[in-house]
Amino acid sequence: MSYSRRQFVTGIGALIFMSGPAGRTVAQTLNINGIRYGMVHDESLCIGCTACMDACREVNKVPEGVSRLQILRSEPVGTFPDVHYRFYRHSCQHCENAPCVDVCPTGASFIDAKTGIVDVNPDLCVGCQYCIAACPYRVRFIHPESKAADKCDFCRKTNLAQGKLPACVESCPTKALTFGNLDDPNSDVSVLLREKPVYRAKAALGTQPKVYRVPSQYGEIAE
């Protein structure tokens, strides 16, 4: 029996298991390189300054009118002067079981075998927008210049390729973002996941997102 590249990648994404207490677990994969990048957004530390958005746009040359990353602000909680907000990172979740990859007819949407990052090959993208429709997080868009699907790639082709952290992580003044290898138990991101309660957006869908969140005690944002 022969398998296509997409069937192989999808099969690998399905071979995961969970261990440890609920909410503090990190899914394991059969990534032979032992690298599977993920991120934690600590909503209790985020101040909504949008420095991450500006850095993402500059480093990745994102045109005006579209965005790979947005920080959404909740409705105000409390009364003046004791008013609080919750800030929510809206970006690609780099799912283990990525619907955008499954529906792509050309293989343009893929999971990078070396990093676990969900990415897009613009040379293969035909702009059909199937991936945009399939993404439950509504984070993809058509790049106005390349006419291909685009979204956050954890700076895979920019900062990561230069041995740096993603631009959003480097620019955050409150250290609300932590990035690293989820398959390394000693990485900063893995240690943080063991130390703090976290949640993942729409985890009930079975997408296995690799963006985790430390919940804020203020506000509420409906996705």
Image: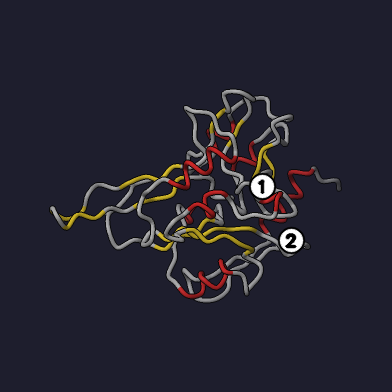
Tell me residue 161's x, y (percent): 71, 49
Depicted 92 relative to depicted 17: above or below: above
| Mark 1 neighbour density, 10 Å: few (under 14) some (14–19) many (20 or more) | many
Q: What residue is drawn where x is 45% and y is 53%?
A: 201
SS at badge 2: loop
| Mark 2 neighbour density, 10 Å: few (under 14) some (14–19) many (20 or more) | some
Q: Residue 125 occupies which quadrant of the picture? A: top right
Tell me residue 131's x, y (percent): 59, 35
**Colour scheme shown:** secondary structure
From the image, state whether disc 2 or disc 1 is nearer to you.
1
Q: Specify which label sits upstream in the sequence, 2 or 1.
A: 2
Tell me residue 162's x, y (percent): 70, 50
Q: What residue is drawn where x is 77% and y is 62%?
A: 33
Q: Which mark is residue 45?
A: none
Q: What residue is drawn where x is 49% and y is 71%?
A: 24
Alpha carbon separation for disc pair 2 and 1? 17 Å
In the rendered structure, the answer to whether residue 154 lies left or right of residue 201 reads right
Foreground: 80 or 90? 80
In the rendered structure, the answer to whether residue 223 lies left or right of residue 66 reads left
User: Residue type at mark 2?
Assistant: Asn
Q: Residue 46 occupies which quadrant of the picture? A: bottom left
Q: What residue is drawn where x is 55% and y is 38%?
A: 58
SS at badge 1: loop
Residue beneath label 1, please?
156
Q: Quadrant of the C terminus?
A: top left
Residue beneath label 2, please?
31
Tell me residue 177's x, y (percent): 49, 58
User: Residue type at mark 1?
Assistant: Arg
